[in-house]
């Protein structure tokens, strides 16, 4: 078999289609193995287009079974059909014409989960980015917008439910045990937003009344028997709808909004117009089976997909290079929503942690790409944290630079000007420029230049002159295809804290632009002089993480402790503690590597324990402080030539020394946060208390050196958060204890029938630190509960092992790299998108110490030399080895 190496698509080659699509009429005759699709398309040639140009439709693994031109069978010499395209020649120069395409596909055999597939007996579709072409030949690109009518015919008993986008037109019996339903979506949309669902599902219903008084029917479909677990998603949906009206002035635009949960899904969820399809992991929750983190994800993803109705659907993307236009913006919107629903500061800390651990490594490795890339070989590989999370940060910086009102003016203009359009990043930025009379040309480098800016800072105070001088320098390292970089616009929120913690306000600032508490670094190096500063200030910089950069500002321990105590921005307080702790963690790693004893840092322990005990701080914040930097964070701080075992060992000793120091505090927290008697509630406050209590539990196990307390917590837990935390502590701290074996076995028996909970069971075991993890993972691969065709299960075992078990995965002998390589090759045969994503776990392989890096390279080269590879995996592997 030949390996398709894929064609590289360039942004610069964009041009509009030669034909305009006016209408789409689809008829699906559903059958598990032989689904027939008849697609009637009405086109006309675009004004000014080449009158000779043929119509070229996209396909993917298709065979043509019929083709009509204006209802009459088309002459064979007028068209050419291959698996990946249908070309039709001799078409009218101006007048509209109709093309009717018939294809027959096999949804059951569709293991790629793109196009029309079956999940647990349910027919469902996934069309973003290029899945529609796996259903029928079509101009499958986001700038082709049309109005769709959809007819669905299927066996009535097996598929009482027949759903598609838009409003329900009607249905009836169809004879032969079949029935049909018709749907009409009045909003022009690109094919990637098409959806169809058929099958037998349970329903949870509610309604929402919009600001203008229209009643919208809300329907969430889940497997029968799971209806009670959809209540939280429904609640989150109603809150999202209200929030988007209040904060962004966006009202829903159809009479019905549906969410369908399926168990086999490559991604989190999909924003199909009026018919969102979700990975059931992000819909189903109850206290017994979902953790607080699960609830938070459900809230965020329900909101995210709903928000796409305006940012993505009403205004879509001109081409896939503009993906951040909908994704970065919509992530920003869901972040803001969650911040309003929960604790803003804690939410921000979690976002930044995630950005640093996922996006920063991407941005500094072989897969680095701009937020708006300029070329791709496989678009599926560009649904990245750079496009999503850094894209969101770029939107946030616009809001920071323009202020709340300026940002709102720009957004309103964007909705006004581009409603119904397939827009570009330039269109978006222009709205903020026009609404605020500002020039964002230099700022736009954030969309076009890859790499995390490194900002180095030094400062000096002149008591006589009462001036504080701040020198800043920015560098963006080279990234693939971008050897040199221009200086960016970096908005830095700052605060000058006096000795007693009050804020010092300068009488004037020279050297650059400062608006309120935000200064703009725009040159490669720039010096700001703050006048009228009566006493030596402590500078808190990049407050709230106003710019997604790495800051190098050597501040004394005292200054950091001062910020940790006094900054009014809780994020900055957390950052200051993190900056205090990081040198201790890196020193511990170095000492562990060289065999030297790790000295305990009492000053650090004092600060951490004091925060843990500080009742004036919300528990979720205290838990974030106690979590310390992850092993990946420490590795990043150390740079290259990393030894994961030393990092792990060093971090454990720091945890142990804090534990010893704060034993009494942790005991008190563990006992008093035991919220006895109060019923479980997934709200942020309850989640925060559980998080703090469970971190206290972890620290206590360091002091007690016994699994007893965690085993007792496991036995007493009355919710999945506490249960899974206790199980993690047992498994990760005491992998060989009898208590751990017993807890894993009881968990398995109790939840054997619940796939989402069993995912946790796999994940906890896949992340047990140390050399033995590999054997365990191999054993789990052979466990009857392991289902290689279910993406959630694959991610919970193989994904967790490769992404989240630094010591286990980076075994010295390289055997775990080999396991990943074998799994990637195996999975690639059925689900390339999933395989490619797993492979990215090795994107930072060059930073490993030479022995491990060598082993990693061998494993990667084995993948590269495989006889058949998908375009998805080939694209990633070649970039990683470049
Ligand atoms: N557009 C989806 C989202 O972010 C993600 C997605 C992409 C889902 C591709 C499936 C396939 O909301
Ligand atoms: Zn999205």
Image (spheres, helix red, strand yellow):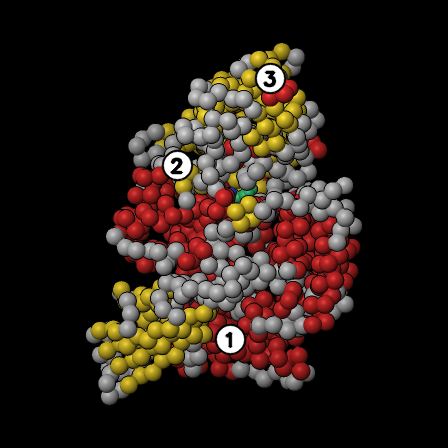
Q: Earlier in the sequence, mark 3 or mark 2?
A: 3
Residue 830 location (% of width, % of height): 71, 42
Q: Residue at x 51, y 75 (%)?
A: 581
Q: Is mark 2 within 8 Å of ligand 2?
A: no
- Which quarter of the figure is the N terminus placed in? top right
Disc 3: which residue: 74
Residue 432 can be seen in this image: yes
Cα separation, mark 3 vs mark 1, equals: 72 Å
Q: Residue at x 71, y 63 (%)?
A: 857
Residue 132 found in image quarter: top right
Q: Give the answer, above or below, for where 440 lies relative to 791.
A: below
Q: Residue at x 23, y 78 (%)?
A: 531
Residue 667 location (% of width, % of height): 54, 70
Cα separation, mark 1 vs mark 2, equals: 49 Å
The numbered dot on residue 581 is 1
For disc 2, the neighbor class at 10 Å (few under 14, some 14 to 19, many from 20) is some
Residue 201 can be seen in this image: no
For disc 1, the neighbor class at 10 Å (few under 14, some 14 to 19, many from 20) is many
Q: How many marks?
A: 3
Q: Mark 1: which secondary structure?
A: helix
Q: Residue at x 67, y 50 (%)?
A: 874
Disc 2: which residue: 421
Are the residues flagged by discs 3 and 1 in contact, CB closer than 8 Å?
Answer: no
Are the residues flagged by discs 3 and 2 in contact, CB closer than 8 Å?
Answer: no
Q: Earlier in the sequence, mark 3 or mark 1?
A: 3
Viewer-proximal residue among 267 and 829: 829
Single out the residue that lies furthest toward the left: 507
Numbered disc in front, either 1 or 2: 2
């Amino acid at each position: 078999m030949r390996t398709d190496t894929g064609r590289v698509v360039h942004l610069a080659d964009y041009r509009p289609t030669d034909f305009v699509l006016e209408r789409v009429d689809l008829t699906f005759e559903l059958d598990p193995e032989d689904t027939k699709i008849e697609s009637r398309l009405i086109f006309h040639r675009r004004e000014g287009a080449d009158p000779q140009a043929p119509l070229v439709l996209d396909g993917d693994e298709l065979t043509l079974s019929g083709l009509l031109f204006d209802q009459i069978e088309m002459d064979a010499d007028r068209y050419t059909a291959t698996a990946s395209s249908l070309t039709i020649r001799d078409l009218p120069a101006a007048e509209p014409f109709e093309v009717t395409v018939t294809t027959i596909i096999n949804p059951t055999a569709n293991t790629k989960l793109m196009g029309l597939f079956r999940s647990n007996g349910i027919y469902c579709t996934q069309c973003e980015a290029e899945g529609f072409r796996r259903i029928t030949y079509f101009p499958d690109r986001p700038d082709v917008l049309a109005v769709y009518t959809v007819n669905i015919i299927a066996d009535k008993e097996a598929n009482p439910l027949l759903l598609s986008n838009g409003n329900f037109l009607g249905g009836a019996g169809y004879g032969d045990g079949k029935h049909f339903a018709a749907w009409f979506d009045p909003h022009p949309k690109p094919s990637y937003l098409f959806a169809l669902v058929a099958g037998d599902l349970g329903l949870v219903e509610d309604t929402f009344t919009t600001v203008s008084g229209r009643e919208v029917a809300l329907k969430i479909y889940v497997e029968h028997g799971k209806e009670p677990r959809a209540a939280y998603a429904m609640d989150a949906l109603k809150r999202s709808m209200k929030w988007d009206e209040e904060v962004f002035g966006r009202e829903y635009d159809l009479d019905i909004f549906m969410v369908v949960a399926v168990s086999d899904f490559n991604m989190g969820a999909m924003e199909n117009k009026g018919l969102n399809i979700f990975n059931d992991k992000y819909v189903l929750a109850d206290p017994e089976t979902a953790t607080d983190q699960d609830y938070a994800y459900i809230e965020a993803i329900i909101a995210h997909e709903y928000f796409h109705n305006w940012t993505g659907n009403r205004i879509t993307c001109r081409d896939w290079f503009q993906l951040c236009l909908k994704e970065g913006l919509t992530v920003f919107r869901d972040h803001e929503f969650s911040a309003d629903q929960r604790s803003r500061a804690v939410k921000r800390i979690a976002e930044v942690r995630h950005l640093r651990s996922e996006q920063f490594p991407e941005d500094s490795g072989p897969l680095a790409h701009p937020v708006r890339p300029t070329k791709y070989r496989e678009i599926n590989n560009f649904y990245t944290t750079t496009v999503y999370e850094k894209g969101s940060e770029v939107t946030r910086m616009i809001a920071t630079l323009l202020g709340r009102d300026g940002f709102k003016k720009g957004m309103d203009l964007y909705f006004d000007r581009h409603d119904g359009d397939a827009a570009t990043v330039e269109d978006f930025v222009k709205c903020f420029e026009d609404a605020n009379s500002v020039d964002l040309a230099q700022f736009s480098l954030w969309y076009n230049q890859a790499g995390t800016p490194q900002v180095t800072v030094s400062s000096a105070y002149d008591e006589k002159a009462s001036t504080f001088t701040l020198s800043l320098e920015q560098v963006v390292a080279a990234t693939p295809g971008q050897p040199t970089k221009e200086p960016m616009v970096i908005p830095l929120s700052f605060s000058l804290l006096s000795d007693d913690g009050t804020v010092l306000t300068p009488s004037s600032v020279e050297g650059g632009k400062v608006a309120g508490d935000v200064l703009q670094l725009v040159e490669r190096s720039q010096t700001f002089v703050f006048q009228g500063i009566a006493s030596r200030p402590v500078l808190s910089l990049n407050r709230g993480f106003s710019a997604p950069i790495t800051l190098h500002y050597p501040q004394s321990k005292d200054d950091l402790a001062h910020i940790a105590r006094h900054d009014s921005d809780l994020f900055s307080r957390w950052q200051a503690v993190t900056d205090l702790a990081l040198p201790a963690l890196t020193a511990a790693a170095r000492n562990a590597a060289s065999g030297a004893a790790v000295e305990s840092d009492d000053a650090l322990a004092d600060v951490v324990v004091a925060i843990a005990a500080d009742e004036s701080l919300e528990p979720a914040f205290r838990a974030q402080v106690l979590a310390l930097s992850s092993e990946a964070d420490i590795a990043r701080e150390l740079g290259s030539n990393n030894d994961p075992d030393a990092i792990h060992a060093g971090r454990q000793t720091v945890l142990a020394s804090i534990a010893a120091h704060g034993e009494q505090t942790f005991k008190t927290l563990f006992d008093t946060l035991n919220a006895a008697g109060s019923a479980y509630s997934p709200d942020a406050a309850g989640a925060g208390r559980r998080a703090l209590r469970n971190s206290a539990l972890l620290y206590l196990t360091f002091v007690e050196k016994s699994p007893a307390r965690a085993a007792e917590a496991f036995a007493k837990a009355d919710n999945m958060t506490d249960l899974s935390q206790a199980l993690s502590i047992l498994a990760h701290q005491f992998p060989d204890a009898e208590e751990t074996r017993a807890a894993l076995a009881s968990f398995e028996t109790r939840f054997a029938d619940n796939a989402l909970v069993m995912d946790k069971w796999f994940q906890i075991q896949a992340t047990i630190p140390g050399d033995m993890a590999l054997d365990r993972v191999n054993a789990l691969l052979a466990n009857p509960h392991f289902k290689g065709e279910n993406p959630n299960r694959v991610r919970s075992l193989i994904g967790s092992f490769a992404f989240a078990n630094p010591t286990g995965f980076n075994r010295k002998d390289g055997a775990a790299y080999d396991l990943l390589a074998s799994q990637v090759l195996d999975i690639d045969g059925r689900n390339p998108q999933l395989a490619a994503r797993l492979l990215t776990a090795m994107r930072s392989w060059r930073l490993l110490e030479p022995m491990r890096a060598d082993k990693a390279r061998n494993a990667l080269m084995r993948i590269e030399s495989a006889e058949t590879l998908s375009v998805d995996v080939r694209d990633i592997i070649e970039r990683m080895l470049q």
